[in-house]
Image: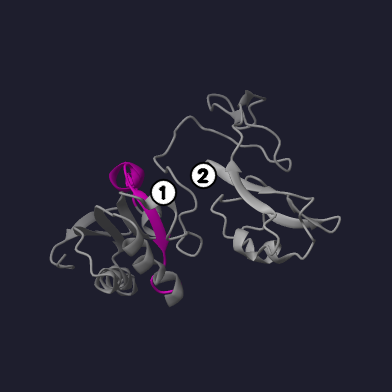
Amino acid sequence: MNETTISIDVDKCIGCGKCVSACSEGAIRMVNNKAALVDNACCDGLGACLPACPVNALTIVKRAPVTPKTTQNIMGPGIPMTYSGETNNRIFVNNGENGNLNQWPIQLRLISPNSPVFKECDLLVAADCTAFSNKNFHGNYIKGRKIVIGCPKLDPQDCWDKLTDLLANNDVKSITITRMDVPCCSGIVRQVSKALENCSKEIPVRTITIYSDGKEVEDRGTLTQ
């Protein structure tokens, strides 16, 4: 989860609802004819809603830390559980094993190419099925990298066009691509190649093909960067 979230000045808000339409996460709703952040956990903190407000009632602020508290273990004996506060009556469970994801969001449709999380990073561009096929995906590929995920077959081209802006606006040091061993997944390699060509940058690239049984094969000569 990002360390930032949205704050709404209700005195400035004129109740136009434009920020509600601009919030793809559904975190903002109209309450008593005023915009309200009704689900702080869903807010990505990137501020895509800010330009929609005609009176500048929205700002980005630092997210308040949540102090976990121990509660009754509903998962069964031997499985640790923590309750991290009330958020729309949801209980957050921690099974004691932390992953390596250090940003949010990761879906290509939701990321901002101008987000500071991508400054001077090693980037993972992952076909969204790959993480489900390899049990070591966090340690092998996510750890130490920023990540964007998408489906080269189902996601529209305007989503993949974000890669050009992301690479152009940030000093990306390396790119790792993970794809599945199916023909349609080769499109993710073409999209990265196209983005590099469009922004006229030379960035080291490696491509990993992951099979449905979890086997990993590094493809040689896929990109000549």
Q: Can residue 42 be seen in this view?
A: no
Asked if residue 147 lies left or right of residue 54, the reply is left
Q: At label 1, which amino acid type do we have? A: Val
Camera-side residue: 9 or 179?
A: 9
Where residue 34 sits: x, y (%)?
Answer: 80, 56
* Residue range highlighted in magenta: 134-155
Q: Residue furthest bottom?
A: 157
Residue at horizontal 38%, vertical 71%?
A: 152
Q: Residue 117 carries which label?
A: 1
Q: State yes or no: discs 1 and 2 in contact (Cβ < 8 Å).
A: yes
- Decide: is 102 above or below 17: above
Which element is circle 2 on? loop
**In 3D space, how far apart are the residues under numbered discs 1 and 2 (Cα atoms)?**
9 Å
Q: At label 2, which amino acid type do we have? A: Asn
Quadrant placement of the C terminus: bottom left
- Disc 1 packing (10 Å; few <14; some 14–19; many ≥20): some
Residue at horizontal 60%, vertical 32%?
A: 75
- Decide: is 199 above or below 70: below
Q: Can residue 187 be seen in this view?
A: yes
Camera-side residue: 132 or 90?
A: 90
The residue identified by callout 2 is: 2
